[in-house]
């Protein structure tokens, strides 16, 4: 309990990320404590400091370094030869004693440019893996935040019920002392208090787990204090944009779709590279020679050019080109499948959100008020002697369970909306009042 009180009462120390997350791997510096836990600050902190995001960012930056490597020309070659011994007599200046050579392959076919396009497409895939890591971490942080808000609200209800029942028990004991109350009512109240206390222990454990999850996602000490979310966190104030707009956004921004598109681009660049392998790249060379009896440092300069002959091994290059063409087809099929899978997931998620919204509205508009009215009726009947205390206790327990289910639906709704952001791959747009089903 002391540890839980520390978690609930001490404001959390959040770190503000001053730099744009995709541009820096350095963690943000500590700042002063905030008076309340805000989802925006929590998400910003996680995006700046989460280790999985930092690792994905480092991999993306490493992939970027492959592009200039792929686009570069082959290294020039230099060579030198010198006479170590001659065992025949020759006329002066008949043979060279020293020779220096410089060679450079010139990629006139553009093979290096094709390799650079392949590397650039693979770097795009690494960037989308970074975006996926950011979206997943943001969704997990939001889910933990809404679950924390739900359990804080449940803990408040638990304390309210315990206080109310404790007051009733004191009245019962006072009446029991003068013989005006049955001992069964006192035992019933005490048993219900124990049930409430047992439920509170479970809530406290869940609360600590959610606070720990938030600390892990934001790369903070697992025992660091986490403030309580705002009371209005769980609400039905907004709904996602229309499905047509979300479809367009998803096909343009979802990391998996963009990775599949990058795969198609890379496959086409490999096909282009295979086609260009049919064209030889010349190797230019420059030679400087010194004859055995020459008085000059350089007696002769010559230049040359050499080519590989790919047409002599046509079977190899035809197979290479055919393989690359089939890989283009496979990458395109994978892109089509990724798009279809994404649209199916979007439709299912919107149906889930709509269902959870319906449940939350039903509980708020009818079920909770009805359960509360039943409690008031049983309380009035109990005070008038027309109902037993057990009826009142059971109705209060039913009210607690109904309120708990309402909070669960509200939290699930907010989590589902957060999952939609991760699913789509971008901010789906401004919120608006919920009016109808997304179909």
Image: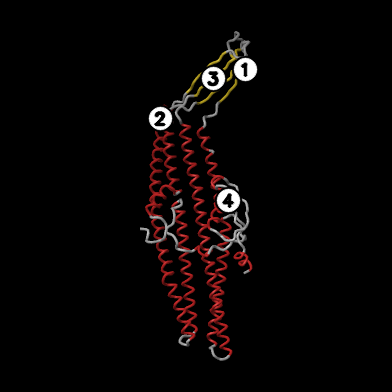
Looking at the image, tell me whether mark 1 or mark 2 is earlier in sequence order: 1
Q: Residue 83, labelled with which disc?
A: 1
User: Which residue bears the numbered disc 2?
Assistant: 314
SS category of the residue bearing label 3:
strand
Q: Residue at x 58, y 62 (%)?
A: 227
Q: Which mark is residue 401?
A: none
Residue beneath disc 3? 286
Measure the C-alpha gap from mark 3 to mark 1: 20 Å
SS at badge 2: helix
The reply to whether the C-beta atoms of the residues labelled 2 and 4 are less than 8 Å apart is no
The residue at which mark 4 appears reads as 17
| 25 up-or-down from 377: above or below | above
Q: Position of residue 433 (x, y in %)?
A: 41, 60
Of badges 3 and 2, the one in the foreground is: 3
Between residue 157 and residue 185, name the one nearer to us: 157
Task: Specify few, some or many for label 1: CA neighbours under 10 Å numbering under 14, 14-19, or 20 or more.
Answer: few
- What residue occupies the far left of the structure in this picture? 439
The picture quadrant where one finds residue 193 is: bottom right
Q: Between marks 2 and 4, how big is the CA–CA gap?
A: 58 Å
Question: Which quadrant is the N terminus positioned in?
Answer: bottom right
């Amino acid at each position: 309990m002391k540890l839980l009180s520390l978690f609930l009462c001490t404001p959390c120390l959040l770190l503000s990320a001053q730099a744009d997350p995709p541009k820096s791997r350095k963690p943000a510096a500590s700042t002063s404590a905030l008076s309340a836990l805000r989802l925006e600050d929590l998400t910003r902190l996680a995006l700046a400091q989460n280790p999985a995001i930092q690792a994905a960012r480092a991999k993306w930056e490493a992939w970027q370094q492959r592009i200039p490597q792929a686009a570069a020309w082959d290294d020039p070659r230099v060579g030198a030869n010198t006479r170590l011994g001659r065992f025949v007599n020759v006329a002066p200046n008949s043979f060279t004693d020293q020779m220096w050579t410089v060679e450079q392959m010139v990629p006139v076919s553009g093979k290096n440019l094709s390799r650079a396009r392949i590397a650039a497409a693979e770097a795009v895939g690494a960037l989308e893996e970074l975006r996926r890591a950011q979206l997943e971490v943001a969704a997990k942080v939001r889910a933990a935040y809404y679950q924390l808000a739900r359990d804080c609200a449940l803990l408040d209800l638990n304390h309210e019920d315990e206080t109310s029942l404790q007051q009733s028990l004191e009245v019962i004991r006072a009446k029991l002392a003068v013989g005006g109350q049955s001992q069964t009512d006192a035992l019933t109240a005490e048993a219900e208090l124990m049930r409430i206390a047992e439920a509170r222990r479970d809530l406290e454990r869940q609360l600590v787990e959610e606070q720990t999850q938030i600390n892990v996602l934001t790369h903070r000490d697992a025992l660091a204090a986490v403030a309580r979310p705002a009371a209005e966190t769980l609400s039905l104030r907004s709904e996602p944009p229309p499905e047509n707009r979300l479809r367009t956004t998803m096909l343009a921004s979802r990391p998996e779709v963009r990775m599949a598109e990058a795969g198609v681009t890379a496959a086409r660049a490999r096909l282009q590279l295979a086609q260009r392998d049919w064209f030889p790249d010349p190797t230019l060379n420059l030679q400087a020679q010194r004859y055995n009896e020459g008085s000059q440092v350089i007696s002769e300069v010559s230049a040359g050019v050499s080519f590989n002959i790919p047409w002599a091994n046509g079977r190899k290059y035809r197979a290479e080109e055919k393989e690359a063409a089939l890989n283009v087809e496979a990458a395109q099929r994978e892109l089509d499948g990724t798009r279809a899978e994404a649209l199916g997931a979007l439709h299912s998620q919107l149906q889930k959100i709509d269902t959870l919204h319906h449940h939350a509205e039903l509980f708020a508009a009818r079920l909770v008020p009805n359960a509360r009215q039943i409690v008031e009726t049983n309380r009035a009947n109990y005070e008038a002697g027309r109902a037993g205390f057990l009826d009142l206790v059971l109705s209060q327990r039913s009210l607690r369970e109904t309120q708990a289910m309402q909070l669960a639906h509200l939290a699930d709704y907010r989590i589902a909306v957060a999952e939609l952001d991760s699913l789509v791959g971008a901010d789906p747009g401004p919120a608006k009042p919920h009016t109808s089903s997304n179909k």
